[in-house]
Image (tube, grey):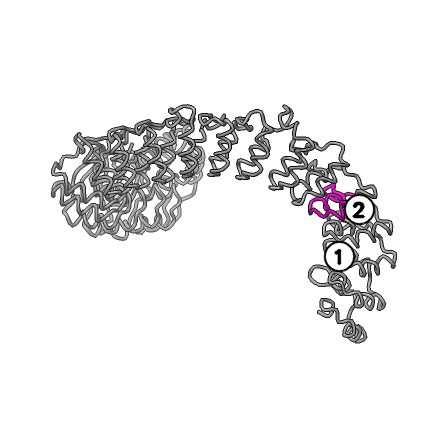
Amino acid sequence: MTAIHGRFVRSEFLISNGAVIDAVDSSGCTTLHIAAFYGHELLSRTLLSFGADPTKKNLIGRTPLHMSCLSGFVECCRKFIHLNVDLDVQDANGKTPLHLAAYNGSIDCLDLLVSSGAKLNITDNQNRIPLHYAASQGKFNCVYTLVGIGSDVNIADVNGCIPLHLAAASDYDGKCVEYLLSHCLDPNKKDNNGYTPIHYAVLGRNEEGLQHLLKACGDKLNSGNLPKLTPLHIASYYGYNEILRMLLPLFNNTNIRDETGKTPLDLASLNGHRQCVQLLLRCGALVASHDNITQRTPVHAAAANGHLDCLEMLLDNAETPTVVDALDVNRRTPLRFAVSSGNIKCVIALLQHGANVNIADIHHHTPLFRAVYSGQFDVVEMLLGQGASVNVQDTNGKTPLHLAAQCGHDSILSMLIQNHNQDVSALLDNQGCNILHWACHRGKVECVEYLINNFNDKVWKGNPFSPIHCSTLKGNEKCLEMLLKYFGKESVNCRDQRGRTPLHIAALSNSIGCMKILLKKQSSIESRDVKGRTPLILASLNGHSQAIDLLLNAKANIKSQDKLKNTALHYACWGQHQSAALMLLQKSKENTVVNITNKQKRTPLHVAAQKGLVQVTQLLIEKGADVLAVDSQGLTPALCCAPNKNVAQCLNIILSSYPPQTGTVTHRGLKKHASVIPLTQSLSPSSTESLASQNSFICWTG
């Protein structure tokens, strides 16, 4: 603190009482660093007299001399120079005290350093000399001094920039630019990216510097060896209209393209620079020019970003009226982009200029699709008023009505239906789904309510995976209740193409609330799908313990078998759903379920053992599971634990060779089965195929 405030008397007292003179702070600065930075010359002298080290560096390698030059305190600087410190010492970034003096514009420090022998052209880690920094900050006195005593104006940094590039970007009074131009060998020199000082002046909005540069080399702007991104593009993109006025007379072609094929008019339109757009149009810029990548025009750019003034100016000055319907690479029109941006005024402007409302993109989406998707009621109404078709289908077969139902825009759905002259219930997409399917699948209660209240035809055509199934799949209880009331009591047991009832779907998706509703409505708890599976089997297949508990409490038959003779317990074990399997066993009042075999004569114990379900295996045995049960391949539950048939064969031989012991179960009786174990087959395919092939849910949309 004494160093910051220059309290040299107090500093003497502290040092005399044992203060460490070269102690450092968190940035590695000593008291002398701080005193030098704040220009406390008397304190610096005191510290030096007590032995402070003037060459000590902080964490970024700067000495007290660096600090005084950075702040511009020449007397402190002089004090260190008198101590014969290294004038050209470099910090961690390679900067000398002269670099910092030049950067800060400390002309007195700079003069003192130079007169004391500091080197002019030492480069830092960016390959910059002090002149670069003086130029980058527009410090004319330092630039003048450095150039005058021999600093090299043509040294390029790591980016290929000479001091003129840097001055062009930030010397707003133009004096440094003018002076450097008079000493520079090539005023049009390119950096590593091919950009000239003119590019830098435009990017920095340096009008004064640009005037000097244009006077020196403006005639070279049309040369073919310049980057495709011209100063004209930069000025247009950033909306520098005054600079654009200076540049336009020097370009033969205002429709010059950058690397992506965009013209200056395209960039000005993109960012809504109205004055730049106006200037470019007056100089012959083309409105119907498509870029090389997206094939969009300036009209697309203005419409997409909601720049109404630019859009109207472009449409009024276009060389052809057809530009209003110009297509990009995805066949999207400006109207499509205007709708997406949600700017209704741009939509109106395009419609007033004759935009076609029914042009579809590569996905067969018209502007109406986008308006419906984003819920823009007024835009939808406007497009319909201009003749937009509500019957058009996209590549998935969906119409705007499907989309409105899917997104839950009930007011828009109502408006679309009023403009639809066909049977709404028969309007199907490629999956065979009608609009009620989609409203139920997404749980859009308002749309479901509107549809069932306004359409008495209860025979909705389409995919047998009905709206009731859809609501159940997604757990939409309110939709389910409305649909059951609408379609009647028989609908509770309606079936999809795989014979599944809504209760099957609820069990499969663990939709507990929907299951309770369906069971209350007397849904058949033992109904079977085309594979003979009950809701309990499907719940077990996916390990849904809550659903299993609910179904068992409703008296579901735990012993039910599907067409492959698998029970719910078989499937729970196969899926390694230990909690589900334990629940089935604990809830079962009949222990006979533990020894039910499937078509491969496998019991649940076979499957539990193979899958490594320790607790389930233990409980099965406690409930009387037959440990000697043999499947169709001659395997007991113990042998099912083997990773393959060869291991099972070896295990069987070893166990069969054990001498019998009193009170223990032996495998002697298995010896007769050893000869029927095929050594060339793997353990799993034939014995588990019936289970593995069923362990999946085929989506309703399939």
Q: Quadrant of residue 135?
A: top right
Three-letter code for the amino acid on which mark 2 is drawn: Thr
Q: How many marks?
A: 2
Horizontally, residue 686 falls left or right of residue 588, namely: right
Of the 4 image quadrants, the one containing the N terminus is bottom right
Question: Looking at the rendered structure, which numbered label has been put on residue 447?
Answer: none
Q: Which residue is mark 2?
A: 145
Measuring from the top left, give residue 12's x and y in whole percent: 80, 73
The stretch drawn in magenta includes residue 131:
yes
Q: Nearer the viewer, residue 660 or 500?
A: 500
Dot placed on the residue nearer the N-terminal end, 1 or 2: 1
Horizontally, residue 407 falls left or right of residue 425, namely: right
Relative to 277, say whether 87 is above or below. Answer: below
Q: Nearer the viewer, residue 405 or 497?
A: 405
Q: How far is disc 1 from disc 2 in space, using C-alphas? A: 16 Å
- The residue carrying pointer 1 sits among few (fewer than 14), some (14 to 19) or many (20 or more) residues within 10 Å by Cα, namely many
Relative to 116, say whether 635 is above or below. Answer: above
Measuring from the top left, give residue 599's x and y in whole percent: 27, 34
Of the 4 image quadrants, the one containing the C terminus is top left
Q: Secondary structure at mark 2?
A: helix
Three-letter code for the amino acid on which mark 1 is drawn: Gly
Measuring from the top left, give residue 318's x and y in whole percent: 42, 27
Q: Nearer the viewer, residue 514 or 264?
A: 264
Question: Looking at the rendered structure, which numbered label has been put on residue 72?
Answer: 1
The magenta-colored residue range is 122-146
